Image: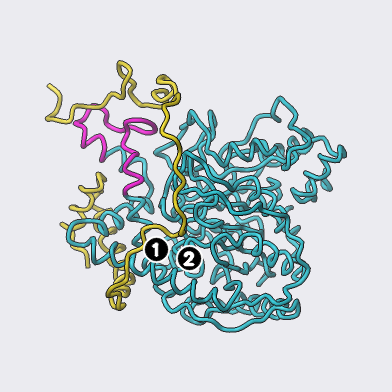
Chain colours: A yellow, B cyan
Amino acid sequence: MLQRDQVLHVARLARLELSEEEVERMAAELSKVLDHIEKIRELDLDGVPPTSHVVDVTAPLRADQPEPCLPHELTLASAPEPLEGGFGVPSPGASPA
Amino acid sequence: MTSLLELTAAQAAAAVRAGELDPRELFEAYRARAAGEELNAFTWVADAAPDLPPDPAAPLGGVPVAVKDLFCTEGVPSQAGSRILAGYRPPFSATVVERLHAGGAPLLGKTNQDEFAMGSSNENSGFGPVLNPWDRTRVPGGSSGGSAAAVAGGLAPWAIGTDTGGSIRQPAALCGIVGMKPTYGACSRYGMIAFASSLDQAGPLTRDVTDAALLLSQMVGHDRRDSTSVPFPEEIRLPTAEDLAGVRLGVPEELTGSEGGVEAGVRESFEATLRLAEGLGAEIEPCRLPHAPHALSAYYLIAPAEASANLARFDGVRYGLRVDGDAELITMYTRTRAAGFGAEVKRRIMLGTYALSSGYYEAYYGTALKVRTKISADFKAAFERFDFVVTPTSPWVAFALGAKTDDPLAMYLNDFCTVPMPLAGIPAISIPSGLSDGLPVGFQLAGPAFSENRLLDAALALERAIGFDGSGARG
């Protein structure tokens, strides 16, 4: 069973704010799913390599040549706060003075 | 007009090429159907037929296509079924969408889906659930449920979706249409809003097998913007097979026995289809996929782990929702994500973050990657003896809206028969095999990597023998 502090720790890592009710529900639901998943840890997987890519082909390479990219103003068009040609964000420090 | 809607997409394309059908009339007929629909299958429908009439020589003949919401389409809402992307209109189009356009299929509309493709019932959409056209009190399956319902309900001639753990094949099965997940790398993922990058593949959802082959023929190929896409080794041909002479079908007991909870009506339809296959000349024998029962566990570690990384980009900075922009940066992130993501997406981000977190990585994610290797090896061994492995697509027919929403694990079990294939990167197709209590049942064939042409041929022979009638859902 996942504990409340574990849920809060993972939520911090995932940058998710959870309500009290969500923390409790998440602990119960994730515990149930993890109990089911646990079964794979009983398998004998000694010496089995992990899969890194499923299809056995060599990735084709392209020539490394500069070419045009999306126009600057288009990349900013969907931003919540375009700012001086960049993406505006709140201060990462303490609350703004 | 009714007769127009009765044409399959390939028939309509042929009529356009022969000069017997005006593609603008076809577009308008479907546009009107899509704009007035009551299944909530679409999140956006084109206002009018494209200005320029399509090239009549184009392979897709001007037959309009419905596109799952998560494919970026330039200037058109592309929200992946999520409120965090509400109103987002990307400045570019997904490669697959561009290819279909170039092949002569104009965009009819964008289809509803489970948020970020996470779900098997379409109840996780931020824009409301989709209803199954066979019975509007039931789910259409998911996550490509809008695409499946649109094709089954006669609101679109054909559609594309994406499959990560069954998201094309399972809704196709529950809606009584054909759905194909190609080999990993066959179609470019560029412009597909990512769920789990090592599993996601685009594919067709169509009224019949010939339509699936025609649409897929214009989707595959290497794209220099997706380094995991590969040149397809051969052209996708229209299938012609009339029988299954000499075709060896393996029936894996692990996916067809009691463990997956396959319900009686689905089992009956599956067994009846095996008898039809035998009548067509197929050799049918039991086969083993010993690790297949563990596929679901591996999938529900790998896919959420990848999703937790992919969805980190939704943070209120470059696009979409921002909440509490006056707060400090981390608070803005956490509140934006709390407000923008639905319950299932949060659950999977949490599960994936946990599986990747320090101290648990090897035990969960690392183990899942090893199980994935064993699942691929099981299929390789099976394909030494068999051409295809066959299973029911979904253990159940379409279930009632709300029936499984309170039990995430029960919902995940939907994917029992469809997750092993994407874990192994191999192609699989679902075709309707009949009805159980008036609801469609899907029959799944899976083959080795790049066996799409042979799969489509076998599916066509079976489709002819089954003679499924989907007109009941088109209203």
Identity of the residue furthest to the front in this view: A63
The percent position of residue B66, horizontal first and vertical second, equals 63, 43
- Mark 1 or 2, nearer chain start: 1
Q: Secondary structure at mark 2?
A: helix
Q: What's the mark number on residue B299? A: 1
Q: In front: B65, or B420? A: B420
Residue type at mark 1: give it.
Tyr
Q: Secondary structure at mark 1?
A: helix
Range covered by the magenta-colored residues: B309-334
Q: Which residue is mark 2?
A: B415
Image height check: is B180 above or below B462?
above
Q: CA distance from mark 1 to mark 2?
A: 10 Å
The percent position of residue B400, horizontal first and vertical second, equals 54, 63
In the picture, which quadrant includes the N terminus of chain B?
top right
Task: Tell me, yes or no, if residue B55 can be seen here.
Answer: yes
Residue B311 belongs to magenta span: yes
* Category of crowding for the residue at label 1, using alpha-carbon neighbours closer than 10 angstroms: few (below 14), some (14–19), many (at least 20): many
